[in-house]
Image (cartoon, rainbow, N blue to C red):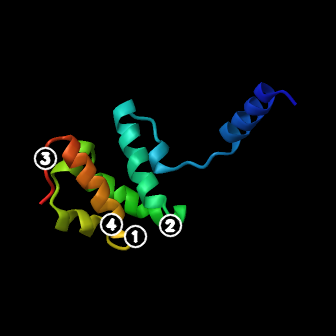
Amino acid sequence: MNNLILTKKILDWYDNNKRTLPWRKKCSQKQREYFTLVSEFMLQQTQVSTVIPYFKNFIKNIPNLDSLAKINEKKLLKYWEGLGYYSRVRNCATDISNDKGQRCT
């Protein structure tokens, strides 16, 4: 089977069978990138069904990269509470705040 045909079949299958997830909603490219970043960090060793309510709450309180870069660590960890692997969110926020020239305190 030709690679292009196989690729098209896989993408068609995905379009017909993909789950509706909050990080896949229609939004700006910048917001989609942020949602993808947050969801990928949350989904490391955590089931999708577990992540969905945490993701919604996290995004409601920390809606973009700027707010993530500025939030203090105590609040950040409160919104992450229950997902475990706290170093994931600390490292993500630290990297983002360093890129923005700010520091999480």
Q: CA distance from mark 3 to mark 2?
A: 29 Å
> Mark 2 is on which residue type?
Thr
- Mark closest to the chain's N terminus, 4 or 3: 4
Looking at the rendered image, the quarter that the N terminus falls into is top right
Whether 4 is drawn above or below 21: the answer is above
Q: CA distance from mark 1 to mark 3?
A: 25 Å
**Tag 3, which secondary structure?**
loop
Q: CA distance from mark 4 to mark 2?
A: 15 Å
Q: Position of residue 6 (x, y in %)?
A: 79, 33
> Mark 1 is on which residue type?
Leu
Q: Position of residue 57 (x, y in %)?
A: 33, 59
- Mark closest to the chain's N terminus, 4 or 2: 2
Q: CA distance from mark 1 to mark 2?
A: 7 Å
Which numbered circle lies on residue 87? 4
Left or right, 83 with respect to 65, comes to: right
Which numbered circle lies on residue 46? 2
Q: Are marks 3 and 2 in contact (CB under 8 Å)?
A: no
Left or right, 11 with respect to 48, comes to: right
Q: Are marks 4 and 2 in contact (CB under 8 Å)?
A: no
- Mark closest to the chain's N terminus, 1 or 2: 2
Q: Are marks 1 and 3 in contact (CB under 8 Å)?
A: no
Mark 1 or 3, which is nearer the eye?
A: 3
**Tag 2, which secondary structure?**
loop
Which residue is the site of mark 3?
102
The residue under the point 66% across, 37% down is: 15
The residue under the point 32% across, 71% down is: 81
Looking at the rendered image, the quarter that the C terminus falls into is bottom left
> Mark 3 is on which residue type?
Gln
The residue under the point 15% across, 60% down is: 72
Mark 2 residue crowding within 10 angstroms, few (<14) / some (14–19) / many (20+):
some
Which residue is the site of mark 1?
83
